């Protein structure tokens, strides 16, 4: 495998080309809807979830090309969740990745509809592969997944979080999509039951570690004790314990891959370390 950063850039560019081809063009009526969908999808994301999907297919011993459709599906679904998370009735964020959020640019109603359309396109894309892809995506998206996590996040309000509450939200708002991405890629690649189980453990540990690392990055510019106020996770665990937890989870994620040939899991191991070592 080439340098990890080169690998990530090459795979992200591949995903972008496939997303561009899979989505309606910006001038397809209704134009404002398709402009909003494309604005959000092509807003500068790392494409980590679809890259994991491709890498999981490789870990199973297949070509990454067999996992393109599930990779696109999980990224479309992920973008829908971001649009809806940013809405005034949810997290009320005006910026994402340094750019105005979808509802700021296109209005709240169009943002809701753009998210709805991306979710539908995600399931349409998954359905072009196999029913298992739809099943994995639906499990990640529904009341026991992302939607349930958002409800729990809203319900917490301004109350001091508990460990169970924080873990519940992180698992459902972040972990489930990592797990779906890896499992969809592994299944597309024909993974054995043992390999699928190992990759599922890897994805679960990685998803939690990635969210902790995100919280630490967001809090890094804040002085001292103020850091904990920026994240429920840091408020519960503290900055130092959260960092130790993220590294421990990555060690467990990498260890779970040991049953697979190391030459097939190089990318997954590199991504795991990148998840906690990244600077943005």
Image (cartoon, helix red, strand yellow):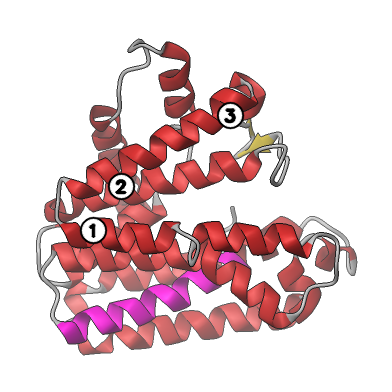
Task: Give x and y (percent) for residue 177.
Answer: 42, 61
Res 35 quadrant in image = top left
Q: Nearer the viewer, residue 168 or 250?
A: 168
Instruction: Please name whichever residue, 125 or 98, is drawn nearer the observer in this view of the structure.
Output: 125
Residue 102's label in the rendered image is 3
Q: Earlier in the sequence, mark 2 or mark 1?
A: 2
Q: Residue at x 43, y 76 (%)?
A: 204
Q: Looking at the image, is 116 positioned above or below residue 24?
A: below
Are the residues tagged 2 and 1 within 8 Å (C-beta)?
yes
Would residue 229 be visible to someone looking at this image?
yes
- Answer with mark 3 or mark 2, whichever residue precedes in sequence: 2
Q: Which secondary structure lies at badge 2?
A: helix
Residue 141 locus on image (x, y percent): 43, 56
Q: Say what secondary structure mark 1 lies in.
A: helix
Are the two marked residues, 1 and 3, in contact with CB atoms closer than 8 angstroms?
no
Task: Give the residue furthest to the front.
Answer: 143
Give the mark nearer the N terminus: 1 vs 3. Answer: 3
Which quadrant of the view contains residue 125?
top left
Q: How far across and how far down the image is residue 98, in percent?
A: 64, 35
**Which label was assigned to residue 73?**
2
Would you say the residues marked 3 and 2 are in contact, meaning their CB atoms lie under 8 Å apart? no
Say which mark, if any, is on residue 133: 1
| Magenta stretch, overall SS | helix
- At 53% from the left and 72% from the top, the residue drawn is 208
Towards the viewer: 46 or 25: 25
Residue 175 screen position, x and y as percent? 48, 68
Q: Is residue 211 magenta?
A: yes
| Viewer-nearest of discs 1 and 3 | 1
């Amino acid at each position: 495998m080439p340098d990890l950063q080169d690998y990530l850039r090459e795979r992200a560019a591949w995903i972008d080309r496939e997303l561009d081809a899979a989505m309606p063009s910006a001038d397809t009526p209704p134009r404002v809807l398709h402009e909003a969908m494309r604005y959000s999808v092509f807003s500068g994301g790392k494409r980590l979830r679809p890259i994991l999907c491709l890498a999981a297919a490789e870990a199973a011993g297949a070509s990454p090309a067999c996992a393109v459709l599930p990779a696109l599906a999980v990224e479309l679904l992920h973008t829908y969740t971001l649009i809806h998370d940013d809405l005034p009735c949810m997290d009320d964020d005006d910026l994402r990745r340094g750019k105005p959020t979808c509802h700021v640019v296109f209005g709240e109603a169009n943002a809701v509809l753009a998210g709805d359309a991306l979710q539908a396109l995600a399931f349409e894309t998954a359905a072009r592969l196999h029913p298992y892809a739809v099943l994995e995506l639906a499990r990640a998206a529904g009341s026991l997944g992302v939607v349930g996590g958002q409800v729990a996040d809203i319900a917490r309000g301004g109350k001091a979080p508990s460990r169970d509450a924080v873990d519940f939200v992180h698992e459902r708002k972040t972990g489930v999509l990592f797990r779906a991405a890896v499992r969809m890629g592994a299944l597309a690649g024909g993974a054995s039951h043992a390999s699928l189980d190992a990759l599922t453990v890897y994805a679960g540990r990685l998803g939690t570690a990635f969210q902790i690392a995100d919280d630490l990055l967001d809090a890094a510019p804040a002085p001292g004790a103020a850091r904990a106020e920026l994240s429920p996770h840091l408020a519960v665990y503290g900055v130092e314990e959260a960092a130790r937890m993220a590294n421990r989870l990555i060690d467990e994620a990498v260890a779970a891959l040991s049953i697979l040939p190391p030459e097939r899991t190089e990318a997954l191991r590199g991504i795991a370390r990148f998840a906690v070592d990244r600077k943005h």
